[in-house]
Image: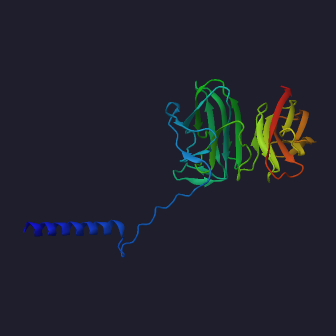
């Protein structure tokens, strides 16, 4: 009797195990498989991140990496991030916008054709070192270079004081110099530059011209130099144009150079305002070749 009960119990155990195995390993023919979760659209640029509410609670980010906010940013609001930097490091702060802006004033996001963006770099004492902004101008790239003097925690405040910021249309980055400063795909407008801060860029490989913009004052005198590595076989051209408030332009200076170098010597600025500099190849190059652009104010007020 005991032996029969043991055999029955064993049979029940084996049958139960077989049923469980069938349930877990072999889906029933009539049971529909659950659909895989839908993947979010990959924008292929910028890691989406959220910062802290203030400098003390800033979130860490890395050098040499593109970032974008993971949320639309209201005008005047800021997200805070930080990096730890060492003395002597040369860094470049970059900000770029694509085609679209966002309007959050009605409580419901509405895309516009005017992107706004802003980023500010602060030193370990909270002093502002650099600030970049894009104010309603599509396909714009801003940059500013800085040499680190003191070690410590450097803070980035991301947000615009002039408009709402679109989470999928603006990218910010802090890079060690040299960095790739060429206009990315979809952002082919003018690049803002600062005098006395060398800008590193590339020409060739399908990119035959770079366009820069800077502000200068009447009677200031500048020396402008674009130079590729020594020994480069390439002819460069440079053209400087003044642009007034009505967007009318006037050529101020032009030059051509061989050996991968071109210079505009002792250029006197005719008016206060915006100046556009074009650096181009006289003949196409098959591969990208780096060059350094230098604007130096030699005299003037």
The picture places residue 104, in percent across and down from the top left corner, at: 55, 49
Q: Residue furthest front?
A: 3
Q: Quadrant of residue 215?
A: top right
Residue at (63, 28) in percent of width and height: 128
Q: Quadrant of the C terminus?
A: top right
User: Which sits in the foreground, 89 or 194?
Assistant: 89
The picture places residue 119, in percent across and down from the top left corner, at: 62, 38
Q: Residue furthest bottom?
A: 30
Tell me: 283 left or right of 27: right
User: Which sits in the foreground, 89 or 209?
Assistant: 89
Please tell me whether residue 226 is drawn above or below residue 220 in the rendered image: below
Please tell me whether residue 233 is drawn above or below residue 32 in the rendered image: above
Colouring mode (rainbow / by chain / secondary structure / one colour):
rainbow
Q: How many marks?
A: 0
Tell me: 89 left or right of 299: left
Q: Quadrant of the N terminus?
A: bottom left
The picture places residue 230, in percent across and down from the top left corner, at: 86, 38
Q: Quadrant of residue 147?
A: top right
User: Which sits in the foreground, 245 or 202?
Assistant: 202
Tell me: 32 left or right of 102: left
Residue at (86, 43) in percent of width and height: 232
Residue at (41, 69) in percent of width and height: 33
The picture places residue 278, in percent across and down from the top left corner, at: 84, 44
User: Which sits in the foreground, 286 or 247?
Assistant: 286
């Amino acid at each position: 009797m005991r032996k029969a009960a043991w055999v029955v119990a064993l049979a029940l155990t084996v049958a139960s195990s077989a049923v469980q195995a069938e349930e877990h390993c072999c889906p029933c023919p009539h049971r529909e498989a659950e659909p895989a979760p839908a993947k979010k659209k990959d924008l292929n640029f910028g890691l989406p991140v959220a910062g802290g509410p203030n400098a003390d609670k800033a979130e860490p980010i890395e050098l040499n990496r593109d970032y974008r906010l993971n949320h639309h940013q209201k005008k005047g609001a800021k997200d805070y991030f930080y990096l730890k930097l060492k003395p002597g490091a040369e860094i470049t702060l970059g900000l770029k916008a694509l085609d679209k802006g966002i309007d959050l004033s009605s409580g419901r996001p509405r895309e516009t054709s005017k992107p706004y963006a802003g980023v500010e770099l602060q030193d370990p004492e909270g002093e502002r070192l650099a600030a970049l902004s894009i104010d309603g101008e599509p396909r714009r790239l801003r940059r500013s270079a800085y040499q680190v003097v003191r070690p410590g925690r450097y803070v980035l405040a991301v947000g615009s004081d002039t408009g709402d910021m679109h989470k999928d249309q603006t990218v910010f980055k802090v890079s060690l110099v040299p960095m790739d400063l060429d206009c990315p795909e979809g952002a082919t407008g003018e690049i803002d530059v600062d005098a006395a801060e060398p800008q590193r860029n590339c020409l060739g490989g399908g990119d035959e011209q770079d366009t820069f913009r800077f502000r200068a004052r009447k009677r200031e005198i500048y020396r402008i130099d674009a130079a590729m590595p020594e020994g480069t076989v390439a002819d460069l051209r440079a053209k400087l144009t003044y642009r007034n408030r009505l967007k009318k332009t006037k050529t101020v200076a032009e030059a051509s150079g061989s050996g991968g170098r071109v210079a505009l010597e002792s250029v006197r600025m005719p008016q206060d305002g915006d100046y556009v500099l074009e650096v181009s190849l006289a003949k196409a190059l098959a591969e990208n070749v780096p060059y350094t652009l230098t604007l130096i104010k030699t005299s003037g007020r």
